[in-house]
Amino acid sequence: MATETRRSQKESERRTLDELLSLLNISRDGIEIEEGELPDFMLVVSGRTIGIEVTMYQSGTTVGGQFGQRQVEGEWEYLQQASREFRAARADISNVSVGLMFNDVAPARKGHRVFMEEIAAFIRSHADTITSDFTAFWSHQFTLPLMRKYLRTLYLRKCDFAEWYTNITAGWVARPPNSALADIVSEKAAKTYRHSDELWLIVQCSNHISEIVLPLGCTVDLNTIPVQRRTFSRVYFFSTRGSFEWEQSSGWKALGPEKKVEGPTFDELKGYLANRDLLDDPIGWRDREIQKVLQEIRGQKAP
């Protein structure tokens, strides 16, 4: 397992390096790339040696007082994948969409099978009440041990595109001034690296809620982040809102057009705050909206 995880990490780092080379219009042809540690890559470009360290952004958020958020997300991903195989083998529950609102964490991997059997039993015992509209079931209605321990709410609904989803994949996302980005740069700057003419750092975001920063103000937000000038000559930040570069002489700038995002208007925000379905079950609300769009599309295509 550790070897597989390490291999996956190195593959991710290579993809990040390829993205950087593409953004900088540097062709792999004619340059030497050596993989290693501290830094992850050594490149020889135009006779100069450039060290590149790659790291994934981590929010540092803990769940349940002791578990890292990414660890909790990872356990859920295993459970969701197991649920797909579990449902495929049980036709009587395969068309039921299941919203699992956990108290904080999902059951550990060794308890997945028992937990899924409890969910299946609950679905069967309430089969007559499950319709195409979401029905919420609360903790006082759970009698089976793992459901009672881990769940606060269960949402069930019959649909053609059934899936098991969770509140674990949702959460608060920081902007750079309130994020762990400065700590990550400082931690990386304190390490000892192999000698190179220049040392670059890449901080990569992903689509996991624990690995996202939202630079809504783009370079304005990023210029609030202190960078260790004596360690890195360049720092790159790859986010879902765009890619950015920091240099000692000029600070932060966007690589390509900045993707500025405007928030909702005041009236739109009031509408969101008044929407109890959205506030109580954001993932379920999202899925219901998707279902509406799909139904509209199918209706338009019907003869």
Image (cartoon, helix red, strand yellow):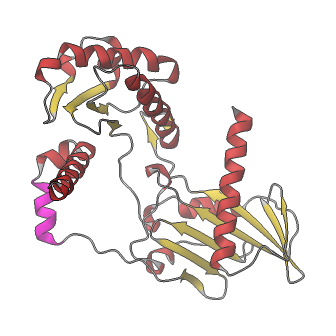
Camera sees residue 187: no
Q: Nearer the viewer, residue 185 or 29?
A: 29
Q: Which of 8 and 208 is in front in this view?
A: 8
Quadrant in which residue 167 is drawn: top left
Residue 270: within the magenta? Answer: yes
Residue at the (50%, 53%) spot, across then down: 211
Quadrant in which residue 250 is drawn: bottom right
Specify start and end residues of the magenta stretch as a single range: 265-274
Q: In which quarter of the image is the N terminus?
A: top right
- Residue 105 sits above or below residue 265 on the image: above
95 vs 201, left or right, is left
Pinpoint residue 86: horizontal percent, then vertical percent: 42, 23
232 vs 168, left or right, is right
Q: Which of 126 and 58 is in front in this view?
A: 126
2 vs 117, left or right, is right
Residue at the (41%, 77%) spot, across then down: 259
Quadrant in which residue 174 is drawn: bottom left
Pinpoint residue 217: horizontal percent, then vertical percent: 40, 76
Camera sees residue 75: yes
Q: Main secondary structure of the magenta part?
A: helix
Residue at the (46%, 46%) spot, across then down: 61
- Residue 206 sits above or below residue 77 on the image: below
Pinpoint residue 168: horizontal percent, then vertical percent: 38, 40
Pinpoint residue 289: horizontal percent, then vertical percent: 20, 51
Residue 97: within the magenta? Answer: no
